[in-house]
């Protein structure tokens, strides 16, 4: 693989995807400390919101320690070079949240839909572009459809005004070949100026390999999280990926030693439990289940005396998609009743 | 018993499904269907069943309102044209039941507040949203027992049952439903979430209702209240089923529902669309009974 000299934008997600393993309880002070350290390490872009994006505060996904507005207003003014992105999932967040994020100084807006439902993102992508934001279409659970179908959805988002399209492996299910065919198909079909990105989860330990496959096939934005802090077995560990990029001559502008310090000294101490591939996280990747379901399944398993791995397998069999956290308790009750 | 003549405005999925239900009604006689596309399947189906039709929109219906004695109209077009339709129809003394998200008139969720609206002789009522019809009765069932500080609903529908209008303005669903949860459901604060799931075969609509009560929930009274509300909804949507719950966890009360349709024109899995047409027809029937009895004489505003 020859990627020497390629320029890639690293996008940290530990303050957004990392909210899942933290049950959305990261404090504004912790966010500011980590964000400024990421900035000093040369990370150019980082995401800050509730784990389920703007407006995610809910019974269904968990109430955060602070509001999206409090987090954004705390973090954005403290950064010297780095920019902040916000995630918005139509059906959960609305254009009102988008306007708020814009008012808070967010530079990038990522509009996320299930990989087959891009047409619910039209109003949000169009407004984001109109407001002059770097606008990303974020196609989640992209393993569930074939590359040709993914291309059609990406074309919709591009037509609404997205200047970057993500292939999002929300379940950490993809293998490098799955990433290669999807990114290559997107690269061949979309306009040359449309950027491509990849968002990985580490449930099968493929975060690094998949991200490299994405770059080789034409992606130039890669998501990861310092110390991997993210849903499931976490995201691609960003400090590890930055080191691999350095070794391969991929240009990221990130200081590996400084980023490793952020991960070790600031993010790891924050963890409620180690981010690693335990049995449940492995099942997420193996069965293709939305990574954010992990803690909900563990809690429901405990409450109803059933196995969390069994709940996750059932959710995979039901072909649940991101956002259907309500089905976890429903499935656990059914399982407990059947015994 | 004399039936009240009604017009179905909109010949799409919703209008056509509503026609099949109305043809079985003891109170409503669907006399007209109004479309804008002469070749639409809905208008063809209406003609086959003896309805008069026009493909010229509401303007094509207006000259016939008086002689065909149209007293009620169901508007299943879009929020964009509803205001104009409503103005034209109401100015001729026709009561309008609005199935679009326009929400000019007050929200109507039949088992919760239909009798109130009928009593107030409203000339225009709005049917909120599919998720609202499926969940607001449960929120109201809890809030009539004790104060609900916050209620949140998650509606999951099959991708194939979400039309282009809903998709183009999905924020309208979340906003309208949240507002209905507060105004009709009686929650102090409401939130609505909608998820589209493309699984094949399509999933039957699922709705989850989470209420946070202001004080410790009275489990027995809330359970009884929910059960009696379920029975009320099942009178017009037989496929409205409690799957699990109520689950009590601290001040959280969670109810897990499934809504299957009757499969009249729309497939059974599209319970989200069926509950709208069924609720609208039930509203129309109540208004029709008031008109027949002479208690309500709709007139031009």
Image: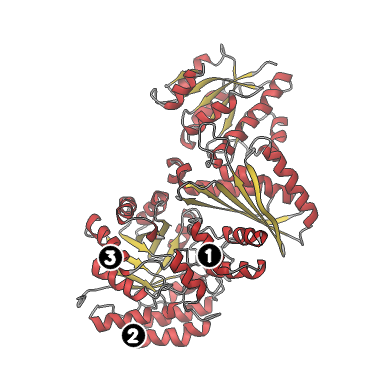
Q: Quadrant of residue B246?
A: bottom right
Q: What residue appears at the point 41 percent right and 68 percent down from the top-left corner?
A: A172
The mark closer to the camera, 3 or 1, is 1
Determine whether, in the image, residue A226 is placed left or right of residue A159. Answer: right
Q: Position of residue B33 (x, y in %)?
A: 50, 22
Instruction: Please name which of the two marks, 2 or 1, marks the residue nearer to the observer.
Output: 1
Chain designation of label 2: A
Report helix, strand or loop for mark 2. Answer: helix
Residue toward you, A46 or B133: B133
Residue A30 in the image, given as x and y percentages of width and height? 51, 79
Q: Is residue B119 above or below residue B233?
A: above
Label 1, secondary structure: give it: helix
Near mark 1 (Cα within 10 A), the count class, few <14, some 14-19 or many ≥20, is: many
Q: Answer yes or no: do the residues labelled 2 and 1 have beta carbons within 8 Å?
A: no
Mark before the other along the chain sequence, 2 or 3: 3
Q: Which residue is mark 2?
A: A256
Residue that label 3 marks: A180
Disc number for residue A312: 1
- Which quarter of the figure is the N terminus of chain B placed in? top right
The Cα atoms of the two marked residues, 3 and 1, are separated by 27 Å
Q: Are marks 3 and 1 in contact (CB under 8 Å)?
A: no
């Amino acid at each position: 693989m020859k990627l020497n000299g390629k320029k890639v934008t690293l996008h940290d997600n530990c303050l957004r995807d990392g909210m899942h393993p933290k049950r959305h309880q990261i404090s504004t002070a912790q966010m500011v400390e980590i964000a400024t350290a990421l900035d000093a390490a040369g990370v150019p872009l980082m995401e800050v919101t509730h784990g389920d994006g703007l407006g995610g505060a809910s019974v269904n996904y968990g109430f955060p320690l602070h509001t999206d507005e409090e987090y954004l207003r705390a973090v954005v003014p403290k950064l010297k070079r780095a920019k902040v992105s916000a995630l918005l999932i139509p059906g959960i967040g609305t254009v009102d949240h988008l306007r708020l994020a814009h008012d808070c100084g967010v530079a990038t807006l990522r509009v996320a839909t299930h990989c087959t439902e891009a047409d619910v993102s039209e109003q949000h992508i169009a407004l984001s572009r109109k407001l002059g934001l770097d606008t990303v279409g974020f196609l989640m659970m992209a393993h569930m459809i074939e590359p040709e179908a993914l291309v059609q959805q990406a074309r919709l988002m591009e037509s609404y005004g997205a200047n970057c399209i993500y292939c999002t492996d929300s379940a950490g299910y993809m293998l490098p070949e799955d990433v290669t065919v999807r990114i290559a198909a997107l690269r061949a079909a979309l306009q040359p100026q449309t950027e491509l990105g990849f968002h990985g989860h580490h449930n099968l330990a493929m975060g690094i390999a998949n991200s490299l496959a994405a770059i080789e096939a034409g992606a130039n934005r890669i998501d990861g999280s310092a110390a991997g802090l993210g849903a499931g077995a976490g995201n691609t560990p960003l400090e590890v990926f930055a080191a691999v990029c350095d070794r391969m001559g991929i240009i990221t502008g990130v200081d590996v030693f400084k980023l490793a310090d952020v991960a070790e000294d600031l993010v790891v101490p924050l963890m409620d439990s180690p981010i690693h591939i335990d049995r449940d996280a492995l099942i997420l990747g193996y069965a293709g289940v939305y990574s954010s379901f992990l803690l909900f399944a563990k809690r429901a398993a405990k409450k109803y005396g059933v196995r969390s791995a069994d709940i996750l397998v059932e959710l995979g069999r039901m072909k649940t998609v991101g956002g259907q956290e309500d089905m976890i308790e429903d499935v656990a009750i059914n399982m407990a009743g059947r015994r | 018993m004399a039936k009240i003549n009604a017009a179905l405005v909109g010949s799409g999925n919703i209008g056509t499904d509503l026609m099949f239900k109305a043809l079985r009604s003891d109170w409503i006689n669907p006399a007209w269907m109004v479309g804008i596309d002469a070749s639409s399947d809905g208008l063809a189906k209406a003609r086959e069943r003896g309805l008069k039709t026009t493909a010229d929109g509401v303007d094509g219906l207006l000259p016939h309102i008086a002689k065909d004695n149209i007293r009620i109209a169901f508007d299943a077009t879009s929020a964009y044209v509803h205001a104009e339709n409503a103005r034209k129809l109401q100015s001729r003394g026709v009561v309008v039941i609005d199935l679009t998200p326009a929400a000019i008139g007050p929200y109507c969720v039949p088992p919760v507040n239909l009798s109130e609206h009928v009593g107030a002789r409203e000339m225009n009522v709005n049917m909120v949203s599919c998720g609202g019809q499926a969940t607001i009765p449960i929120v109201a069932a809890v809030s009539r027992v004790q104060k609900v500080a916050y209620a949140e609903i998650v509606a999951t529908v099959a991708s194939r049952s979400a039309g282009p209008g809903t998709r183009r303005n999905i924020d309208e669903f979340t906003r309208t439903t949240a507002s209905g949860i507060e105004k009709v459901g009686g929650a102090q604060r409401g939130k609505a979430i909608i998820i589209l799931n493309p699984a094949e075969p399509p999933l039957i609509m699922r709705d989850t209702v989470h209420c946070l009560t202001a004080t410790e929930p009275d489990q027995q009274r809330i359970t009884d209240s929910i059960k009696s509300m379920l029975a009320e909804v099942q009178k017009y949507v037989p496929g409205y089923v409690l799957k699990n719950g109520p689950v009590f966890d601290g001040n959280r009360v969670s109810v897990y529902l499934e809504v299957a349709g009757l499969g009249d024109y729309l497939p059974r899995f599209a319970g989200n669309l069926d509950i709208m047409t069924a609720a609208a027809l039930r509203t129309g029937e109540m208004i029709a009974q008031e008109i027949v009895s002479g208690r309500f004489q709709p007139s031009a505003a």
